């Protein structure tokens, strides 16, 4: 089953043939997947009499486990096509949102349920033949039977342990080991969705944790904004803006689902799907070198509204750490006298977004259930964006001023279902469905801003537009590259900014831009601040930093032990050639390593923000 999945992966996703070493690494992870899964039923099988009922039950249990693995493998192939990575703990979330995801699979990935059905039927009949043939095998008999059985059990246990650990090395194998001698693409080929899913489930906090004073000081030095003061040794990121009086501008933060920078006209795409955004970018503070922290919405939301990243694939949402004390955007602005609202027109509970928005301090939460039952919707995820934007406008009109309003769009997203009459591209255009949905999303922005410009609050509002993540881009720069725009006529000077920027930077940027004298615990750095910049990215098996040196754009990777290599994205945007010599000075590498570990400490030990103000004195 896993061998077949590797072959299918090779056909679907690799542009160059996997070298022999990639197949050997794939075998290593296949054995590490199979050995623990089948150990107990395999042991029962060995110890049971041949042809007996217990042995047949053990075989059927092995069959059930194998079929469950088939379920994950088939789903992982579709998941990888969209996310560009193997599934991790999202596996659990898909079971929680089974109905929605099943509809998406039927509409956009018809081949997936078809493969699953055919493979399932073939597997059942094949396994039944295996079980029936087992009783024909002769039982061990004669002298030395118990000795031979003990030897078999010992050998089976030893090999199972050896395969589970991935060899005789000092520590057990982990996903990062797939990339030691392989490129990103070939490392992904060597892994499988079963292994990555269960590894993430049982290693939810497998990221570095550092809390010593010197490391905290170094971490703070690379994120400190102008006129910011850190106020608690126990809370590494907690700080306050000092200086001029607050500028009580309203804030509208629009998080754009699956807007890949590569697909926008302002970045050179010729399809013409984003004419309005392209024109708006020319009138605002436009960041051409901004990056998402992850490749899924569930990883991006905490980064966007709370400046808290996913670390080493350990999603913050759904983790035990989600209940940590934090200073999300809602809490920060509420303490500054703002009314707060968060709109995500999917069903309440979808991916846990409404619950997280509440934890981030938002008071008014709008979901699918907040609309009329007959509100136009896409049949899978929720209410269409043009309807949701109308609701945002009316809610803003009624909200006490100043306000902060976050709108998380639903489109473009597979299966790319749109209202009738929204088709600009036919199937002769590559990615036609995506581009149609992107054009629809751009059109909803045009309609929203056309209406907003007529409102009395428009001139007193800062608009932030940012994608949550890129969509279906090959691993490399494009898979994290997103648009980021700050637009406020008469307040924010229009310009193109080529400095590196991150989703984590939005919250501290708004605090400094509006000079809010309120506590925040952002793990990013304000874009108004001087000094070197970087963008943290989560790559499942590593923590990465996109930064610049001497005009070259670098992706610098760290595993749990330290620096592990880098890509020169100015020459290798697709991450094909992992370079080992350190590209940065030792002090800079140490600061980045410490920053990564201090983030891990703050998350793992609930030291992001205080439970009450007493801790800040």
Image (spheres, rainbow, N blue to C red):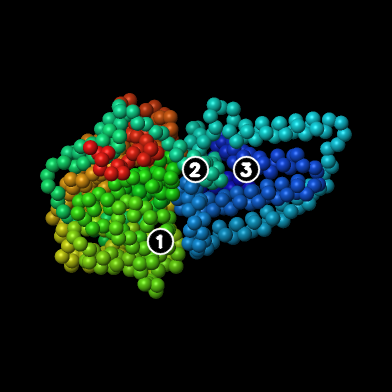
Give percent across and percent down for residue 335. 22, 51
Q: Are marks 1 and 3 in contact (CB under 8 Å)?
A: no
Q: Residue at x 80, y 47 (%)?
A: 52
Q: Residue at x 54, y 53 (%)?
A: 75
Label 1 element class: loop
71 or 470, which is in the foreground? Answer: 71
Q: CA distance from mark 1 to mark 3?
A: 35 Å
Sort mark 3 into few (<14), some (14-19) or many (20+) by Cα contacts within 10 Å: some
- Give the left or right position of residue 245, taking residue 438 as reference: left
Q: Which residue is mark 3?
A: 37
Q: Which residue is mark 1?
A: 348
Q: Which residue is mark 2?
A: 200
- Give the left or right position of residue 202, taking residue 476 as reference: right
257 or 13, which is in the foreground? Answer: 257
Quarter of the view holding residue 27? top right
Label 3 element class: helix
């Amino acid at each position: 089953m896993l061998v077949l999945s590797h072959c299918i992966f090779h056909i679907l996703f690799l542009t160059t043939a996997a070298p022999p070493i990639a197949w050997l690494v794939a075998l290593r992870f296949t054995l590490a997947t199979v050995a623990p899964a089948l150990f107990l039923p395999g042991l029962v099988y060995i110890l049971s009499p041949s042809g007996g009922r217990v042995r047949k039950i053990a075989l059927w249990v092995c069959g059930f486990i194998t079929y469950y693995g088939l379920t994950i493998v088939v789903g992982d192939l579709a998941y990888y096509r969209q996310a560009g990575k193997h599934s991790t703990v999202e596996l659990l979330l898909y079971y929680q949102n089974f109905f929605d995801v099943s509809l998406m699979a039927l509409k956009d990935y018809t081949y997936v349920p078809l493969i699953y059905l055919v493979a399932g039927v073939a597997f059942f009949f094949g396994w039944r033949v295996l079980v029936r043939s087992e009783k024909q095998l002769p039982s061990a008999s004669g002298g030395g039977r118990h000795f031979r059985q003990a030897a078999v059990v010992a050998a089976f246990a030893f090999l199972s342990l050896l395969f589970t650990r991935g060899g005789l090395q000092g520590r057990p194998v982990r996903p990062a080991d797939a990339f030691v001698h392989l490129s990103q693409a070939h490392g992904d080929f060597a892994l499988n969705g079963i292994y990555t899913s269960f590894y993430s489930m049982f290693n939810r906090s497998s990221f570095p944790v550092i809390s010593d004073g010197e490391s905290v000081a170094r971490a703070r030095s690379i994120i400190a904004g102008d006129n910011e003061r850190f106020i608690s040794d126990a809370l590494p990121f907690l700080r306050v803006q000092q200086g001029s009086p607050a500028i009580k501008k309203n804030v509208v933060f629009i998080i754009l689902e699956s807007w890949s920078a590569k697909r926008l006209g302002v970045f050179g795409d010729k399809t013409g799907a984003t004419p309005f955004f392209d024109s708006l970018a020319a009138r605002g503070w436009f960041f051409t070198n901004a990056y998402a922290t992850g490749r899924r919405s569930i990883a991006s939301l905490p980064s966007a509204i709370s400046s808290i990243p996913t670390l080493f694939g350990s999603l913050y949402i759904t983790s035990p750490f989600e209940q940590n004390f934090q200073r999300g955007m809602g809490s920060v602005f509420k303490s500054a006298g703002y009314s707060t609202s968060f709109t995500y027109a999917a069903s309440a509970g979808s991916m846990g977004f409404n619950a997280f928005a509440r934890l981030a301090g938002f008071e008014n939460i709008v979901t699918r259930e907040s609309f009329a039952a007959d509100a136009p919707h896409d049949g899978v995820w929720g209410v269409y964006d043009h309807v949701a934007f109308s609701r945002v406008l009316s809610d803003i009109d009624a909200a006490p001023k100043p306000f902060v309003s976050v709108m998380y769009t639903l489109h473009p997203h597979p299966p790319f279902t749109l209202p009738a009459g929204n088709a600009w591209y036919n199937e002769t255009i590559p990615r036609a469905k995506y581009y149609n949905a992107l054009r629809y999303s751009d059109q909803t922005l045009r309609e929203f801003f056309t209406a907003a410009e007529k409102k009395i609050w428009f001139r007193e509002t800062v608009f932030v537009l940012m994608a949550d993540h890129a969509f279906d881009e090959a691993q490399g720069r494009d898979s994290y590259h997103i648009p980021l725009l700050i637009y406020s006529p008469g307040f924010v000077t229009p310009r193109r900014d080529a400095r590196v920027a991150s989703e984590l930077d939005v919250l501290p940027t708004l605090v400094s831009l509006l000079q809010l004298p309120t506590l925040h615990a952002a793990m990013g750095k304000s874009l108004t601040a001087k000094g070197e910049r970087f963008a943290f990215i989560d790559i499942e098996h590593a923590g990465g930093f996109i930064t610049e040196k001497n005009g070259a754009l670098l992706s610098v990777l760290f595993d749990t032990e330290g620096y592990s290599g880098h890509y020169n994205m100015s020459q290798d945007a697709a991450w094909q050639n992992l370079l080992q010599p350190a590209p940065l000075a030792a002090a800079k590498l140490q600061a980045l390593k410490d920053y990564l570990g201090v983030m891990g400490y703050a998350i793992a030990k609930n030291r992001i923000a205080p439970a009450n103000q007493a801790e800040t004195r």
